[in-house]
């Protein structure tokens, strides 16, 4: 059961990242971001919202080790912390920001809680 849910989490991560990598303008629109004309925004989306998550998900699938899934959970916990901070300080659109926070937090909790006891740490 844990392995199946880990694989689903990795595939979701790859899917989220694929949108950022292959469709950065769509992703920017979904995140309410604008390209400032230099196209560095597109570069940043492809890198930090795209391929970073594709690589993390692929690495987890290839390695298959609990420690890899824990680290993916740590990445999601960092995203959730940043999103929660933004909810309090930046007044983003509440529904959208909270939905993204909920997804990030749920993935973080699952990946860390389910895999940390199984790791050799």
Image: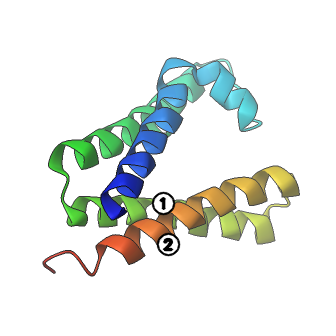
Q: How many marks?
A: 2
For the question of whether residue 33 can be seen, the reply is no
Residue 15 at x, y = what percent?
49, 34
Looking at the image, tell me whether mark 1 or mark 2 is earlier in sequence order: 1
Residue at 37 percent across and 73 percent down: it is 114
Q: Residue beneath label 1, please?
A: 76
The x and y percentages for residue 59 are 24, 44
Tell whether 67 sits left or right of 24: left
Dot label at residue 27: none
Pointer 2: what residue? 109
User: Residue placed at 53% from the left, 29% from the top?
Assistant: 20
Q: Residues within 10 Å of mark 2 (few under 14, many from 20)?
A: some
Whether residue 20 is situated above or below residue 111 in the rendered picture:
above
Q: Relative to 40, does residue 110 appear above or below in the rendering? A: below
**What residue appears at the point 24 percent right and 59 percent down from the top-left corner?**
68
Expressed as whole percent of the image width and height from the top left, the position of residue 86 reads: 72, 63
Is residue 5 in view from this perspective? yes
2 relative to 17, above or below = below
Q: Which residue is the extreme one toward the left? A: 120
Q: Is residue 60 left or right of residue 90?
A: left
**Quick one: SS at disc 1?**
helix
Task: Tell me the quadrant of the picture where the N terminus can be found.
Answer: bottom left
Callout 1 touching callout 2 (CB < 8 Å): no
């Amino acid at each position: 059961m844990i392995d199946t849910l880990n694989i689903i989490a990795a595939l979701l991560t790859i899917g989220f990242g694929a949108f950022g990598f292959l469709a950065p303008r769509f992703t920017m629109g979904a995140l309410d971001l604008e390209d400032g004309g230099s196209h560095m925004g597109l570069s940043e989306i492809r890198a930090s919202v795209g391929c970073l998550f594709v690589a993390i998900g692929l690495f987890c699938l290839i390695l298959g080790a609990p420690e890899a899934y824990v680290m993916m959970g740590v990445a999601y916990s960092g995203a959730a912390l940043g999103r929660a901070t933004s909810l309090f300080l930046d007044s983003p659109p509440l529904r959208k920001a909270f939905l993204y926070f909920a997804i990030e937090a749920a993935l973080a909790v699952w990946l860390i809680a389910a895999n940390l006891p199984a790791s050799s740490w």
